[in-house]
Amino acid sequence: MQAQQLAYFLAVAETRHFTRAAELSRVAQPSLSKQIRNLEDELGATLFSRARGNITLTPAGEVLLPLAQRILADMRTARREVQELTGMRRGLLRLGATPSLCGGLLADTLALFHRRFPGIELHVEEGGSRDLVRTMARGELDLALIILPLHSSDPALETRPLLRESLVVASSRDRPSPTSYASMRITDLAETPLVMFRRGYDLREATLQACRRAGFEPRLAVEGGEMDAVLRFVEAGLGLAIVPSMVLRNRPGLRGTPLARPRLSRTIAIAHRKDVEPTHTARMFWHTLTDHLGQLDDTELGADLEVIEVATHPRADT
């Protein structure tokens, strides 16, 4: 079994077309087809069903797909790791983070890291926590800032809690306040339209579970948005939304009302795959992040953000 054969297999699995896969792989279609047949002979199983021109994965192909993705991702990681030993003069860091973290904590940390290691190429993937966990399982991220706890069906990840953040009820300042008190109860939202995140966001699940534990099913004015869309919908007066407190900074059109009964919060953690050691570049970013957190004072953190721990990054030789 050769890495090139696995790459051709993934190209066909993605395009469901041998000719398009060959074009993407920059190889003649007969050569690609031959390598796929050689791979099938090696494995003793047919990987694609070719009935009537429709290319679909067989059960054996479905089993191989995530394994091939991880094998090729690990090979790229090995190549990067060796290159990075040249002194961090070049390399790649693939980092995932939720939208609320990208605009604040992550941006500041990346700026510090880039000033220290300007030759490192930075790739950031923004998405919901569950989406990032799945992307990391495929070997497409080195590190991710995700929300705990992980679900039982999630892949094996090594996680370290970093921050605990309060969730608040966001409302438009152009509309009357949703309460005359300093805080709200979750039951106060029972008759209020809510703006809901798309599936894959931990905030969606946190909101739905909190409402259901309080004994009601929330009324949804609109659902399916990313963070920026949800905040804009709230500003327009479509409804309220439960969001992290940090996303309301620099949003003068929104107010945040704390939840008192029960108080809702989330734990932000840094994660990597258990079966793959973080690259040298990833360890150096982890080191930069935890050092940055350790230097933040209460004014910079705000009342709704608490550092859990800052001394648990993997050892990084500087």
Image (tube, rainbow, N blue to C red):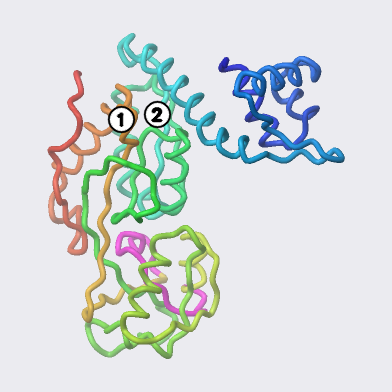
Where is residue 82 drawn, in percent x and y?
A: 37, 12
Task: Please tell me whether mark 2 sits on a helix, a strand or a loop.
Answer: strand
> Which amino acid, mark 2?
Leu
State the separation of the CA atoms marked 2 and 1: 11 Å
> Which amino acid, mark 1?
Phe
Q: Is residue 246 magenta?
A: yes
Q: Quadrant of residue 271?
A: top left
Which residue does the image show at 56% across and 17% down from the upper left?
3
42 is higher (above) or lower (below) than 131: above
Q: Is residue 297 magenta?
A: no
3 is higher (above) or lower (below) than 61: above
Is residue 27 rendered to the left or right of residue 171? Answer: right
Is residue 54 rendered to the left or right of residue 2? Answer: right
Q: Any mark on residue 113, and which?
A: 1
User: On the rendered image, what quadrant is the N terminus found in?
Assistant: top right
Q: Any mark on residue 93, and which?
A: 2
Considering every residue shown, the one lying at the far right of the view is 52
Query: Foreground: 203 or 120?
Result: 203
Task: Please tell me whether mark 1 sits on a helix, a strand or a loop.
Answer: helix
How packed mark 1 is, by other alpha carbons closer than 10 Å (few <14, some 14-19, many 20 or more), is: some
Where is residue 255 drawn, in percent x and y?
A: 34, 74
Where is residue 149 drawn, in percent x and y?
A: 29, 56
7 is higher (above) or lower (below) than 31: below
Which of the two discs, 2 and 1, sits closer to the camera? 2
Say whether marks 2 and 1 touch (CB < 8 Å).
yes
Read off the magenta span: 235-252
